[in-house]
Amino acid sequence: MQINVTSEIGLLKKLLVHSPDSGIGKVIPSKAQDWLFEDIVHLNTIRRKEYDYYTKLLLYFLDPALIKGRLKAIDDPKNDYRFFKPGSAGFHHSKNVIEIEVLLAEILRNAAIRQKLVASVCAIENCSYNTQEMLLTQKPEELARIFISGTGTNLEMLFPPVPNFIFTRDIGIVIKDHILLNKPAKKARLREALLMKYIFFNHPLFKDYRNNIIELSDSPYHFLLPVDADQYNVTLEGGDVMVVSSQHVVIGISERTSMAAAHQVATTLFKKNIVSKVTLVQIPQKREYMHIDTIFTQVKKDTWVMLGAFSKKQAKKEMSDLILRAIEDQKPETAVSITQFRKDNISKPVRFASLEDLLVDISKKDLKVKGPVRIIHSGNDEFPFDLREQWTDSCNLLALKDGVVVGYDRNDKTLEAFRKAGFAIIDIKTLLPQLESGAVHPQKLKDTFITIPSAELSRARGGFHCMSMPLLRETL
């Protein structure tokens, strides 16, 4: 299988996903934030009435032979939605919309891998010896389900679920033909990282790329450092990494990705001659921002969506408040620091005054846009809708191709801004019959925002950019 990602907007051809599993339905209020969920969600709704639409859309774009002509049967409740259930006899098994749970079950058929992974998971989760022995007797599909959800078909709950597994971008990022593995900041995501490490190093899909896997190492003598020595901790999640061109990667320094990790990634990318330019974007370490893809994503070569609080307008306002801030001895909540390094002149970094300036620069210099660059703002840049809709991932969009994005239906003001910018807004429930009948061809869509129901999905604090790990995009 080929992997290659050189942009955020090239035609999407393969990606890794994980459908909501039963572990999500076991999150309780007292543990929700420990497990990095903002709220508890209703499992059947998030599956059947929201995420399944996302799966259908991806298949129509990436693997239409598996779904076209079968939509009515797939949606028939008599078939128990097996089409969407990893491990079931009727699962779609797409080679382009690739389910992580299936890959995990496949590597667990190897006895040596199964033994090592069971031992590793049990060490992380502090399992008893008897539990470890019991896990070794499970069938691969059942063991994969246990590792992800924390419980099996006929078992009590053995350890916590990993509900964030649906956010596959955070697990790893493909940069050209290399795979950058994450190093999670939160304990709740350690098992995710471990499972994906075993998949990338052991699954036949990635056998040609094992030498292209980038793992981050901890700072020397990190175990002697204080627990709160954040500047030395090496932590990284994929929501803070964007491949904006074949030679340029943007890395966020955020609540989840540390300065030490960003520097290590930049150094590695330069040493391996993977890219020639790396931009570090340091944003406030606040829950509502979390990753850089929660405040901006790319829509097409000349168009971006972003939170207006990080725009030039806000930067000017902050300058006028300089004296007040000095008196109050605090930084503005939307302060950013943007530094760009070039491999051929690393001693002379370029600094950008605002996030907006960086995005325009990427479009103009990296993507060779000749005309104006458009910035569409969250909530149409109207308070309080800008902040409300950013919280529900108005800026966290997945580009299926240049100018065609998928996002949540609930962000009304943001959709209004897209409409004003000339984009067609189409609900997935309207689009699916048109894709099925052939009235609409995915490759012919232009300047389109596809909306998907989001009452439950948005509670998890991640959009479709988070719920995708692109493996292959067409080169622009």
Image (tube, rainbow, N blue to C red):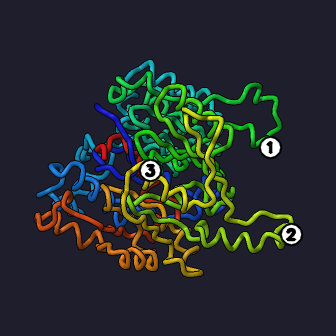
Above or below, 107 relative to 98: above
Q: Quickly name the residue at label 1.
A: 228
Q: Quickly name the residue at label 2.
A: 328
Whole-percent x and y of residue 379? 50, 76
Q: Secondary structure at mark 1?
A: loop
The amino acid type, in three-letter code, at marker 1 is Asp
The amino acid type, in three-letter code, at marker 2 is Glu
Name the image quarter holding residue 412: bottom left
Residue 25 shows in the view: no
Q: Residue at x 64, y 37 (%)?
A: 263
Residue 435 shows in the view: yes
Q: Residue at x 48, y 47 (%)?
A: 242
Whole-percent x and y of residue 233? 71, 38
* Distance between mark 3 and mark 1 Cα atoms: 39 Å
Crowdedness near tag 2: few (<14), some (14–19) or many (≥20) residues, C-alpha within 10 Å: few
Q: Quickly name the residue at label 3.
A: 365
Choose between 336 and 78: the one closer to the eye: 336
Name the image quarter holding residue 383: bottom right
Q: Nearer the viewer, mark 2 or mark 3?
A: 3
Q: Which is nearer the N-term, disc 2 or disc 3? A: 2
Which residue occupies the extreme right position in the image? 327
Say which mark, if any, is on residue 290.
none
Q: Nearer the viewer, mark 3 or mark 1?
A: 3
